[in-house]
Amino acid sequence: MSFAQLGLCSELVRALDACGYTSPTPIQREAVPAILSGQDLLAAAQTGTGKTAGFMLPLLQRLSQYDFARSNSKAKIRALILTPTRELAAQVEEAAKEYGQFLDIRSMVMFGGVNIKPQIERLNKRVDILVATPGRLLDHVSQRTVDLSGVETLILDEADRMLDMGFIRDIRRILPLLPANRQNLLFSATFSDEIKTLAAGILKNPLSIEVAPRNTTAGTISQVVHPVDREKKRALLEKLIREGNWEQVLVFTRTKHGANRLAEQLDKNGIPAMAIHGNKSQSARERALGEFKAARLRVLVATDIAARGIDIDLLPHVVNYELPTTSEDYVHRIGRTGRAGADGEAVSLVCVDELKLLADIEKLIKRKLPSVVIEGFEPDPNAKPEPLRKPMPTQQQRNRNSGSGNAHDKHNPVTKKPAHQAPSTGTGQARRPAPRPQGKPSTSR
């Protein structure tokens, strides 16, 4: 099946052809016709299968059918896309630009941690698609700088992650501001019970699409566990990188402090590395991601803020330097590799402290991970487990757990440090490639 056979217009097919894509992925084959018909949709697919293009392509087509030249009324925001993190918001809006490059569609991205004034100025101009994080959107609502009365389509992207981060209160505050008569699309990596409850309160007679069983990992990802003592992990990681000639590696730690320390140690030992996490400023995070994507940085050390929504072309290696305390996050971490049919490798360095976490992960994904002991790094059979250092909860999670306060953080949950405004709209700006729907190995979501 081709994209044209899905019912997409020639301008969209032309844009996809310019990117070298020839055929839709399974989630796109099912989602695109449903969205074009105006149906509400509840869609789940494992990461890397093209979810972003699955909703962006039909959304652009529906919006393009409006003739602004013949309309005398003031143009309003017609599509609202909510995402849990800034990085994902920026990439979704990039996809809108890339796929809609031959259409008269105007998009804008809005997130916290940056100056709000440029966003207010942009909102005074025509915006067809608004991609936003919930916290910053509510900032604009409180300042009466955004009008949501014309929204025809609401999309919740990575809805399960938004629930994990405590955005449910923010979402419930936003919903009454939208027209009752609208199309609702909910995209998620999994169909948890919480997601089904959220969907029941938003969607109307939705079509349900699940292209992969819950919490499965892509078959193109080879997974292996290397048992090792905790104090030898860094040395083993360096050995794997050097002897395997790994040129691009995404490494996950549980804590921000651990990410900083590991990146500094790797860099000191001649392996170029930078850390990315919630305490980094927006400009620092963008710089680290840009260097890594451009292959000028060998290792990017990240906390789970980067586990979802970060697309890196043909990323070959993901390393769990420390296993996540939440089993589902393992699936999302390793989903950064092996995307859109490409091969990838996921390596987990597991010490005695993490054996219970490993067992929980294997139970979740319903498979035993192969274990390979590296010579010279055999774990001490008499080692005793120590308590794990867990990451600090976000402000939203603290509010949710306490049962009080507002889950809304005006600077978005991932950081409270201001940074320079990232380019969000306009022409002439350098853009990173949008998430790719299909074809050559790519970064589709």
Image (cartoon, grey):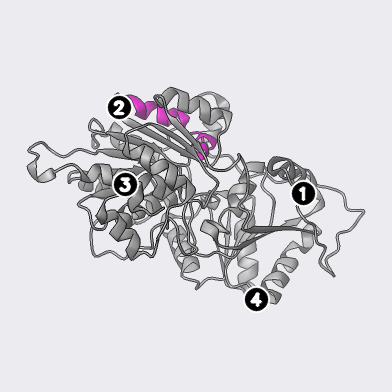
Disc number at residue 368?
1
For marks 3 and 2, give the one nearer the viewer: 3
Q: Are marks 3 and 2 in contact (CB under 8 Å)?
A: no
- Binning the other alpha carbons within 10 Å of mark 1 as few (below 14), some (14 to 19) or many (20 upward) gives few
Judging by the rendered image, the residue that carries numbered circle 4 is 245
Q: Nearer the viewer, residue 122 or 219?
A: 219
User: Tag 1's secondary structure?
Assistant: loop
Residue 342, compared with residue 416, is above or below; it is below
Residue 426: assigned label: none
Pointers 3 and 1 in contact (C-beta within 8 Å):
no
What is the spatial separation of the Cα atoms under label 4 and label 1, in whole angstroms?
Answer: 27 Å
Mark 3 vs 1, N-terminal side: 3
Q: Mark 4 vs mark 2: give the one in front.
A: 4
Badge 3 local density, few (<14 within 10 Å), some, or many (20+)?
Answer: some
Tell me the SS state at disc 3.
loop
- Indicate left or right for 401 with 432 as reference: right
Q: Secondary structure at mark 4?
A: loop
Q: Residue 102, position in %: x, y?
A: 23, 57
Cα separation, mark 3 vs mark 2, equals 32 Å
* Residue beneath disc 2: 177
Q: Earlier in the sequence, mark 2 or mark 1?
A: 2
Between the residue at mark 4 and the residue at mark 3, the CA separation in whole angstroms equals 45 Å
Question: Dominant secondary structure of the magenta stretch?
Answer: helix
Kindly report the distance in space between the C-alpha atoms of the residues bearing marks 3 and 1.
42 Å
Q: Which label number is shown at residue 7?
A: 3
Q: Kindly report the distance in space between the C-alpha atoms of the residues bearing marks 4 and 2.
A: 53 Å
Give, as a three-letter code, the residue at label 1: Lys
| Sequence-earlier tag: 4 or 3 | 3
Which range of residues does the magenta coloring cover?
Answer: 159-176
